[in-house]
Image (spheres, rainbow, N blue to C red):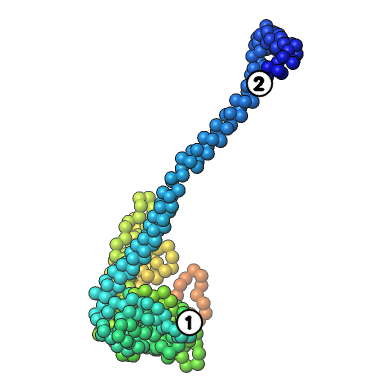
Amino acid sequence: MEDFVTRYRNASLLVAVLFVQFVLLGYQVKTGEDVRLVRVWTTALISPVEKLLGSGTGVFGSLWNEYVWLRGNRAENKTLQAANERLKLETQQLRRALARFSREEEILAYQQEILSETVLAQVTGVGSNPNAREVTVDKGRREGIKPGMAVITPDGVVGKVQAAHGSYSLVLLMNDADSGVGVLLKNSRARGVLKGTGRVECRLEYIDTEVEVAIGETVYTSGEDRVFPRGLPVGEVTRVGAVSDYQEIYVRPYAALNRLDEVLVVTAGLHENLPRFATPQPPEVMMPMPPGVPDAVSSNGLRDRIGTAPNNAASETAGGQPPFGEIPSLTEADRLLARYRALGAAQQHRYGEGDLQTPPPDFNLGLPSAATLRPPQGGQASSGTTSPPVSNQPQENRPEDTVESTGQGPGGGANGADRNP
């Protein structure tokens, strides 16, 4: 180093003098923003180094925070992931258990409701034959199950036990081609045999074409097959067609035969009565119309029972004016109803209260006879005068012209028939 300074002494001195001269010049000269030139130079030289150091610090800090500092969290993350997977599996198991408990609760409630003695069984598998509709349950001869016993669910009939072993049994489903169930229809009580088709729907046979079968009609067990107790729901009618002497009827079972979980095996069956289907009762209460709205039903007396109408209905039928404050009949049906009511009241007949042997009232009472309608002899009458009608009947046997004239009808009608034979 000393040799270099000694050798280049003059040049080194010149460089040093020039550097000091530039520094003094930069210190004395100012820019347009009143900033000394030496500061501008210093900033231009230091800024790149500062940026480089700043970026290096950011990279180093990120590396430290994202890798070195979190190096111990990797094991914790794996532990949390394993716990999360375990909780997911437990949640799924709890959901399945809850669903199973709900189904078992429903089946146990149904088991207490029916009269037959049953055993709760779990479906564990399906039959090995792909063409057969069979399932395997986890109850067998140890629980008292024998071949031929009925298998049901709260939804409907499932099938019957085909084979029973020590700890499991084989159940033949009702939609199997070799299966048959004695059933009857809800409305007509017509009896038939429900046979499996190997598919979802079953075929109901031996129902005459005279029997009226509706789509959606419920099918129940009849008990005549001596396998299923009477009164159990089986399914509903989906299709109806006529084939020769019998109808072609297809029934969809109520029980979900393709996704069975728990079933009831009937160990001691008891026949039950079919459920009664009550028809809806007619309304007995009717509110009045709102204020300002005319009520034609009330004004015409249609709420009254037929046969108990007052005499003003008869006077209106005869052509008189209705009482003050009432609205006259609006249609021919209203006038015809008022006439029938008046005829019933005149003959002391109360509609709907008589026996089957009670004769109906004479609805021809008060109508002119055929002889009365005959035109007068000797030509037509003039337009100014009206000739009385000529009748060949005796005076004492001639019916009265109107009901209102006497209030009571004669012994016979216009056709000569006795009113009360």
Left/right placement of residue 141 relative to residue 374 reads: left
**Residue 90 image position (x, y, % from top left):** 36, 60
Identify whether 205 is placed above or below 158. below
- Label 1 sits on a secondary structure element that is loop
Circle 1 is placed at which residue position?
Answer: 199
Which of labels 1 and 2 is toward the front?
Answer: 2
Residue 2, quarter of picture: top right
Q: Nearer the viewer, residue 332 or 46?
A: 46
Q: Nearer the viewer, residue 88 or 264?
A: 88
Q: What residue sits 37% from the left and 81% below the top?
A: 136
Q: CA distance from mark 1 to mark 2?
A: 90 Å
Residue 387 seen anywhere in this rendered image of the structure:
yes
Quick one: quadrant of the N terminus? top right
**Residue 94 image position (x, y, % from top left):** 34, 62
Q: Residues within 10 Å of mark 1 (few under 14, many from 20)?
A: few
Q: What residue sits 43% from the left and 76% below the top?
A: 258
Identify whether 271 is placed above or below 260. below
| Residue placed furthest toward the bottom | 245
- Label 2 sits on a secondary structure element that is helix
Quick one: quadrant of the C terminus? bottom left
| Residue placed furthest toward the top | 28
Residue 271 seen anywhere in this rendered image of the structure:
no
N-terminal-most mark, 1 or 2: 2
Q: Nearer the viewer, residue 198 or 194?
A: 198
Identify whether 181 is placed above or below 16. below
The three-letter code of the residue at mark 1 reads: Arg
**Residue 169 image position (x, y, % from top left):** 34, 84
Q: What residue sits 24% from the left and 81% below the top?
A: 117
Circle 2 is placed at which residue position?
Answer: 45
The three-letter code of the residue at mark 2 reads: Leu
**Residue 361 image position (x, y, % from top left):** 32, 79
Identify whether 67 is placed above or below 141. above
